[in-house]
Amino acid sequence: MPNIIIREYPSHAFEALVRYGLHPVLARVYAARGVEAPNQLDVELSRLVPFEHLKNVSIMATCLADAILTRKRLLIVADYDSDGATACAVGIRALRKFGAIVDYLVPNRFEYGYGLTPEIVRLAAAAMNRPDILITVDNGIASVEGVAEANRLGMQVFVTDHHLPGDELPDAAVIVNPNQRGCDFPSKHLAGVGVMFYLMLALRAVLRARGIFAPPRKEPNLASLLDLVALGTVADVVKLDDNNRILVRQGLQRIRKGRGCAGVNALLQVARRDYRRASAYELGFMLGPRLNAAGRLDDMALGIECLITDDESRALQLAAQLDALNRQRREIEADMQDSALAMLETAFSTHHRQNAGQDTTDNSLNTYSLSLFDPGWHQGVIGILASRIKDRFHRPVIAFASGGDGEIKGSGRSIPGFHLRDALDLVSKRHPGLLLKFGGHAAAAGLTLRAIDFEKFRDAFEQITQTLLTPAGLALVIETDGSLDESELNPELALHLTEQVWGQGFPQPAFNARFRVETQRVIGEKHLKLKLRRQETQPGEHSSNKLGRLYDAMLFFHTIPLPETIDAVYRLEVNEFNGNCTLQFILDHWFPTDLSTGA
């Protein structure tokens, strides 16, 4: 059974937030996430870290201003995920408002791979009668060879990225990256779209100082881009520190007021979500996957076009295509997951979490990591597959698919306490030449191998994993915000919680309690709809001595009946039907209660 740990919080922070007027539940939730003063809850744009703290951003902005005024041709080289797509859209929209001659190029991941490669540079050279400047978004910090090729062909390269730099930096004209050495920007978790937004803020300041916006020319309102910034930030699963929460909250407020761009509104429409109640959940689990589907299965240009058009009918048409691709992606993913589980079942002869209907992690595997390869797997979906298998077995997972020319491409996902990119760096150092390419960060990374080296890599990665992880590190730990009194369980609190910005590093509140399962039935052929009754247990009492109110609950993607009594970790949600708002629990985890001991 996983360890359930209640998040601790400093009492002084809790008391300060309560004195500020915050609901006690919210006060303890925020205090447990590092909020120590009320001003940290201020999400006004004026609290953003000033762009001047971002190393080289003013230099790059000045160069861009010169390029705009001298009519140089700019080409944005984007990445093929939602962060890259939104960063590209922010750049295209803002630069065109500033009067730039700008276009974009997004590499097809299956033909050219990731980043500004020499092949992409040569492709870019053929665009726009050869652009004068290439601007990378969400990539470029590792593109040493690509930048060298651009320099050889007479094109300047401006790198905007947020990934961790390697030992060698590309010889770019300017680099803006909060994680580069010597940058004192305090928000090291800025997404690629956030970096591009900051660059546009700096560029506007330079143009303003030069008098470009003198009447009758109107100064562009860059706040209009915050819906895109919010989408890319949440979808890229970067840590929601204070600065990122401001960006996301401001973007969500625009969306909720109906001021999102045509593409964001269209994506919400095809996902059948109400823009007036948009939250970080919609951005991360509804819009992000539909946008990513283009890069995974087809061409991310489809997603970028959806985000840069102002034509609502065209945006809806493009969003419908993205929705169709996402449905196709889900089918491919399901087949791949089935084959991966069959592969693991054969290899380890283990029982999985479904045994006895218990929601638990199977730690009977005799490895600390999982490296999986099937030549039939889709290269664009292996990242999702790695994430699903990681969640299931609570181990670092790398899934590989064929990459052509005798190579295989891998996508990895990690667990807390294991820095995946650093682990791959150790593999590379201990086995020179084994990794043809690699990059990423703590939670996710990508790499390329020769197909014949798969088993060698699997063993080398396992060795590194066993060095860096302990058996305790493989144990699933579930953090909660404790229990709630029945007086605190109401739709008003649930609504207030769902309106806040939650995400990576600032998790959505979850609570734990014991319940008696009064009724349960399968709906939609794959979910359980439940009626639960709170069960309060005092020391020495039998677990059924004290019963509470009855609550509606949902357990998604589970159809096996639950036992009579369970311990559960749940989130609060508002269920709106026919204008009425009722409280509903969403079960994230559940465990059978031992009725014989009352434990």
Image (tube, helix red, strand yellow):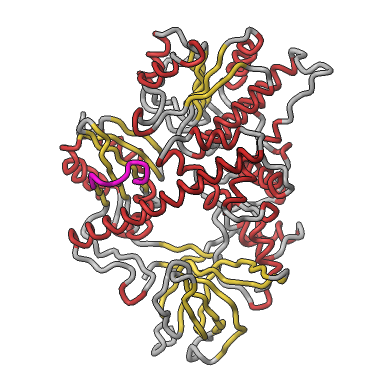
The quadrant holding residue 592 is bottom left
Q: What stretch is highlighted in magenta?
A: 374-382
Q: Nearer the viewer, residue 264 or 183?
A: 264
Q: Does the magenta stretch include residue 375?
A: yes
Horizontal side of 33 relative to 415 (left or right) equals right
* Residue plotted at (83% across, 18% down): 216
Residue 123, given in percent of the width and then of the height, sits at: 41, 18
The quadrant holding residue 166 is top left
* Residue plotted at (71% across, 57% down): 16
Horizontal side of 360 relative to 92 (left or right) equals left
Q: Where, quadrant-wise, is the C terminus in this rendering?
A: bottom left
* Residue plotted at (67% across, 52% down): 275
Residue 491, given in percent of the width and then of the height, sits at: 68, 70
Q: How many labels does the image show?
A: 0
Above/below status of 183 relative to 340:
above
Residue 347, given in percent of the width and then of the height, sits at: 18, 58
Among all residues in the image, which is located at the extreme right?
215
Q: Is residue 199 magenta?
A: no
Main secondary-structure element of the magenta-colored stretch: loop
Q: Which of 183 and 118 is in front in this view?
A: 118
Q: Nearer the viewer, residue 207 or 461?
A: 207
Horizontal side of 410 relative to 25 (left or right) equals left
Residue 361, given in percent of the width and then of the height, sits at: 34, 65
Q: Where, quadrant-wise, is the N terminus in this rendering?
A: bottom left
Above/below status of 67 relative to 9:
above
